[in-house]
Amino acid sequence: MASSLKNLSSYSNENIPDGSSFKIGVIVSEWNEHITSALFQGAFDTLIKHGLQEDNIYKILVPGAFELPVATKILLKKHTLNAVICLGCVIKGETTHNEYINQAVAQGLTTLSIATGVPCVFGLLTPNDEQQAKDRAGGKHGNKGVEAAITALRMAATKNDLNKDKQKIGF
């Protein structure tokens, strides 16, 4: 279903793991701050709602979206985290700069996720205009910060579940 038809941030609490044992980083781009601060608030409130202690949420501000991957790497070197949420907003302009930034961030976070084994959640809005960004930062399409937080919680729990020692039968 197209996003224009519903609020994509609606979710069932039944499927969300308890985050009380997790430590999660949240890196926020200051570019388009009026959008990214709303994304952060949605992510923060969702993490708290699902059990994270405020002391276990590690927030870093970076100048722009392009800096999200390197800040993720720095944060992962400093703290042992269950997941990292990267929030930003690159609004399409008159040039194609947005395509380069968005692709670089996506590739950087994917590479870090695979290399470290820590889920690095892509919470970068890539709208065509400011209204689309507002619609996705607490507007009619929900808050992508909420969705990023839910993804981080679910991926952290999945990683924990798969890393548990299990009795093996056989060879």
Image (cartoon, grey):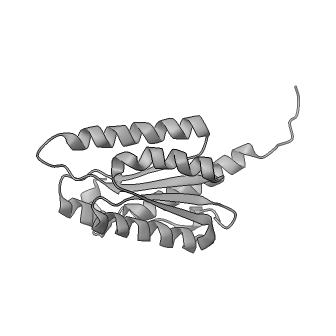
Horizontal and vertical percent position of residue 19: 63, 64
Residue 161 in sight here: yes
Residue 139 horizontal side relative to residue 147, left or right = left
Q: Which residue lies most toward the top here? A: 171
Quadrant for the C terminus in the image: top right
Number of callouts: 0
Q: Would you place residue 25 above or below residue 49 in this image? A: above
Horizontal and vertical percent position of residue 62: 40, 56
Q: Would you place residue 44 above or below residue 80 in this image? A: below
Residue nearest the viewer, comparing 75 with 7 = 75
- Which of the 4 quarters of the picture holds residue 101? top left
Residue nearest the viewer, comparing 35 with 46 = 35
Residue 52 in sight here: no
Q: Would you place residue 167 above or below residue 161 in this image? A: above
Horizontal and vertical percent position of residue 46: 50, 69
Q: Residue at x 82, y 43 (%)?
A: 166
Residue 48 horizontal side relative to residue 2, left or right = right
Q: Residue at x 47, y 38 (%)?
A: 110
Q: Residue at x 49, y 69 (%)?
A: 44
Horizontal and vertical percent position of residue 58: 55, 62
Residue 2 horizontal side relative to residue 71, left or right = left
